[in-house]
Image (cartoon, grey):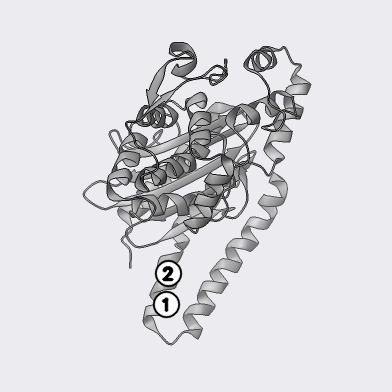
Amino acid sequence: MHRLLKAAMPARVMARMIAVACLLVLSSSPSFARDVARTHVDGLQQELDRLVLPFDGQVGVYVLDLNDGRAAFVNPDSGFPMASTVKVAVAVNILSLVDEGKLDLHQQVLLKEGDIYPEMGGPMDTHLTAGSAITVRDLLHMMLTVSDNNATDILIRLGGGTAAVNARMRALGVSGIRVDRYIWEMLANYYGDTEASAARPLGTADYARLSSATRSEEDRKHHRQLYNDDPRDTSTPAGMASLLRLIWQGKALKPDTTAVLKAIMADCRTGEDRLKGMLPDATPVAHKTGSVGAVANDVGVVTLPAGKGDVVVAVFVKSERGSTARDAMIAQLARAAHDYFLFVPGG
């Protein structure tokens, strides 16, 4: 796959340059030419291509300047496993229900037996038990800042299930994002129980045994590949960028809930070496990471200094090279976008 990408890339770049040139020649309207140039920026595109070409793995990236719509991308319409970046879509569905008066951020959710799966990561497994009560806002905060998977599954259920999240994306006009499973289902499948599903539920004790079972490296690699190739619970870079754009432009949620989501994402405690990894110190980044096996993702919005606006950066990576290499690729792409939009003025 990587060899094919390397061979096709120069032709793709050349085709893009020819297409832009033809549009500039054929159009008699100066404003049309400016719109084309602002939709896609060749200088940044060349840098993204240069960074991705030698990487041993698959990369999808979409960067978008929210000030003027300039964008660049690699594999924008390819589906990548979302891992925990799905939690942005889950949060939008929950906060939309708040906007509609069907939920309240301060309402208490009473935890029942079977609500908390062990070995899922996050504070709920450590600190809460059946009979505990937690607010919707606290569930959102745990889901987005420390990526608590139990909080996510509770919110998916509270929001009407995975079908409701998908319906919400369609209502917003966001394509390329599909949510198929609860987190416990996805991880159970990843660990090797391919039959586990909402229709064939796995109890918490059985899940604990599955997640802690010893597996050979060959078995692990096999299931990593199955996860990487699974069309379920995937997003295209363009789809995730579209969702983030709608959030930041106040078109997905009402002002109060938009502010809540932005504030929680700005408090994300995971992935310090990803989008933030090579940015100048103290650069504001509101984001959500995702990691499963050979997958490392980070999606969010970077705020440029000196009032120069916000930049959407959505990066999805699949590679067996290891976490350091995956994180570095995300960091390099984010820095390239940051510097380009900071120092190269729009038209």
Residue 240: percent from left, percent from top: 50, 49
Residue 275: percent from left, percent from top: 42, 37
Residue located at (56% from left, 67% from top): 16
**Quadrant location, the C terminus:** bottom left
Residue 136: percent from left, percent from top: 38, 31
Q: Look at the image and tell me whether residue 299 can be seen.
A: no
Residue located at (44% from left, 29% from top): 143
Using residue 100 as the reference point, say whether residue 154 is left or right of it.
right
Disc 2 packing (10 Å; few <14; some 14–19; many ≥20): some
Q: Quadrant of residue 117?
A: top right
Check whether the beta carbons of the residues at disc 1 and disc 2 lie within 8 A of each other: yes
Q: Secondary structure at mark 1?
A: helix
Total marks shown come to: 2
Instruction: Inspect the image, locate mark 1, and give the three-letter code of the amino acid beneath it.
Output: Ala
Q: Is residue 219 above or below residue 245?
A: above
Task: Give me the disc on residue 33.
Answer: 1
Mark 2 = which residue?
37
Instruction: Inspect the image, locate mark 2, and give the three-letter code of the amino acid beneath it.
Output: Ala
Q: Nearer the viewer, residue 47 or 109?
A: 109
Q: Is residue 101 above or below residue 41?
A: above
Residue located at (29% from left, 33% from top): 281
Using residue 113 as the reference point, say whether residue 254 is left or right of it.
left
Q: Is residue 289 above or below residue 22?
A: above
Using residue 192 as the reference point, say whether residue 320 is left or right of it.
left
Residue located at (40% from left, 38% from top): 287
Q: Nearer the viewer, residue 336 or 263?
A: 263
Give the residue at the far bottom of this rendering: 28
Q: Is residue 156 above or below residue 240?
A: above
Give the residue at the far left of this rendering: 306
Residue 134: percent from left, percent from top: 38, 23
Q: Look at the image and tell me whether residue 169 can be seen.
A: yes
